[in-house]
Amino acid sequence: MHALPHLTAIDWLSIAIFFACWAGYAWFSEHSQSGSAGLIGTSQSYRLLWAFRMLERDNRVMDSTLIGNLVTSVSFYANTTIYIIAGLVAALGASDRLLSFTTELPFGGAGNRELLEIKLMLLLASFVFAYFKFTWSLRQFNLLSILVGAAPLGKAGEPGIDTYAHQLAIANNLAGDDFNRGIRAYYFGLAASGWLLHPLALATLAILVLIVLYRRDYRSAALAMLRRGR
């Protein structure tokens, strides 16, 4: 709290833009009616289709392999995030040396030690958030593995099959959504590093990240391909 008086009006404005972009896009992509037409919402329909196809198969080695690949991807990000967090904690402990380095950067550097620490704390908070999302995604993928192991054999319309397929799809969606939240935290964590240069760099990078995320989720070739298959 002792660092807060060192924040200027431009700092506060940039922080507000940063969190508005992050929280606003998260709400739009996950809860709005328009957002459901994006890459995340379209992928969910394919997860349900995957669940029905899996329940029809007697041999589910392929499905287990696919889930294993998903778990490997999430594990990679979770492990990487630990190293990033450790590096940021070390940077907090060496803030004096880091401050002397940032004074040589353009746009005024990171300011005084107290201001540098709060900038690093924003970075640290972003990646801690990402770590919690990745680890929770891992646990939910493990739950999905259990559901696959206990899955009955049958086709759509048979007793209990539709309900179980929706359970599988929901578990897959929950794990995938938390993975997406972790990736989003990575993007905005990179934007937060712009604050080390200048407050306006924080706001500018947050807006650029917002544009990149929107283009990839709603204007990408990957989304167009998925829509053609529906």
Image (tube, rainbow, N blue to C red):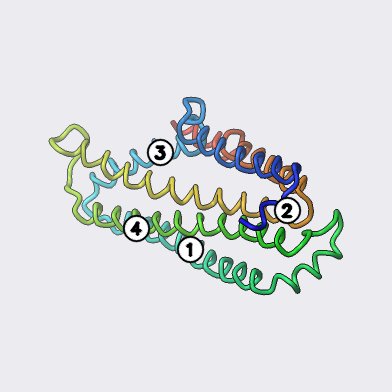
Q: Residues within 10 Å of mark 2 (few under 14, many from 20)?
A: some
Disc 2 marks which residue? 6
Disc 4 marks which residue? 139
- Give the number of the mark in front: 3 or 2: 2
Who comes first in sequence, dot 4 or dot 3?
A: 3
Q: Residue at x 34, y 38 (%)?
A: 49
Secondary structure of the residue carrying tag 2 is helix
Who comes first in sequence, dot 3 or dot 2?
A: 2
| Amino acid identity at mark 4 | Arg
Q: Nearer the viewer, residue 25 or 124?
A: 124
Q: Residues within 10 Å of mark 3 (few under 14, many from 20)?
A: some
Who comes first in sequence, dot 4 or dot 2?
A: 2
Q: Residues within 10 Å of mark 1 (few under 14, many from 20)?
A: many
Who comes first in sequence, dot 1 or dot 3?
A: 3
**Image position, residue 165 (x, y; %):** 25, 41
Q: Nearer the viewer, residue 191 or 113?
A: 113
Which residue appears farthest toward the top when viewing the image? 33
Who comes first in sequence, dot 2 or dot 1?
A: 2
| Amino acid identity at mark 2 | His
Q: Quadrant of the C terminus?
A: top left
Disc 3 marks which residue? 44
| Amino acid identity at mark 1 | Ala
Disc 1 marks which residue? 78
Tell me whether circle 3 and circle 2 mark residues in contact (CB < 8 Å).
no
- Give the number of the mark in front: 4 or 3: 4
Cα separation between marks 4 and 2: 41 Å
